[in-house]
Each structure stands twice: as C-alpha cells, then as structure tokens.
Image (tube, helix red, strand yellow):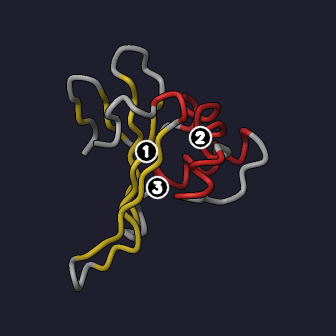
Amino acid sequence: MELLETADLVIRPPSAAEEAERAFEMMNDPDVRQWNPTRECPDVETAEAWLRAGADWSEGSHATWSALDRASGLMVGNVSLFAIDRDDKVAKIGYRVHPDARGRGVAR
C-alpha cells in the first residue's frame, strides 16, 4: 500500500525528511510515553532514525504508516502492525496520536 486517503487523512509509510520534528514531539509527549512508549528520543535525529526504521518493512516483522492531516500535510499520528506471525496470521497493533491532534477522530 502506497497511499490511503480518507476525507481528513492521508495514510502512507513514514517519511523521515517530512515528519521528524512532529515525531520528536509525539515520542516525547507524556501521554504517549505512558500509554504507548517507544525508544528514548533525545533529539530530532533519533526521531528520523525511528521513522526510517518504521518505513523499512523488508524483514516482514512490522509495517508502520503515518497519518497526515489532509489539509495541512502535518503528521498527526502513526499506526504499526508488529510482532507479525505469518504462520498463525496474527499481529499486534499500536498507534500514537500527536498531542495537538487528539480529540479530532484521528484514531477512531
């Protein structure tokens, strides 16, 4: 899947160049850290590396997409399938929403 569009969102693989600052903010948000933690993110470069890793699906163990606000183009969240077990056809799912996008139906 390259691109999925809804009335409000564009869903696509992560882009480190376009989303690093927003990812840095989201990864350091106290609510995200409490409910859906990720690696420590001390700087924007770490956020870029996280986004690049999310966009690399070559191992088949995960797939990550960014959710962008259709009007502004800003990343408002992300969703990942991880711990993919192809034999049993199961995976876990996790998502994060940027603090300024909460309450707008991004993760409904």
Outermost residue, front side: 103
Asked which quadrant contains residue 7, the reply is: top left
Contact, mark 1 vs mark 2 (Cβ under 8 Å): yes
Residue 88 image label = none
Contact, mark 3 vs mark 1 (Cβ under 8 Å): no
Residue 63 vs 19, above or below: the answer is below
Identify the residue at horizontal 52%, vertical 28% (top origin).
100
Report x, y in % for residue 68.
Answer: 40, 29
- Location of mark 1 (residue): 78
Report x, y in % for residue 59.
Answer: 42, 69
**Secondary structure found at label 2:** helix
Which is nearer the eye, 81 or 27?
27
Identify the residue at horizontal 34%, vertical 73% (top origin).
84
- The image quadrant where one finds the C terminus is top left
Question: Whole-Å distance between the Cαs marked 3 and 1?
Answer: 15 Å
**Total numbered badges shown on the rendered structure:** 3
Outermost residue, right side: 42
Of circles 3 and 2, which is in front?
A: 2
- Location of mark 3 (residue): 56
Question: Whole-Å distance between the Cαs marked 1 and 2?
Answer: 10 Å
Of circles 3 and 1, which is in front?
A: 1
Which three-letter amino acid code belongs to the residue tagged 3? Asp
Q: Earlier in the sequence, mark 1 or mark 2?
A: 2
Residue 59 vs 74, above or below: the answer is below
Identify the residue at horizontal 40%, vertical 74% (top origin).
83
Residue 26 image label = 2
Circle 3 packing at 10 Å, graded few (<14), some (14-19), many (20+), is some
Question: Whole-Å distance between the Cαs marked 3 and 2?
Answer: 20 Å
Q: Earlier in the sequence, mark 3 or mark 2?
A: 2
Which three-letter amino acid code belongs to the residue tagged 1? Asn
Circle 2 packing at 10 Å, graded few (<14), some (14-19), many (20+), is many
Which three-letter amino acid code belongs to the residue tagged 2? Met
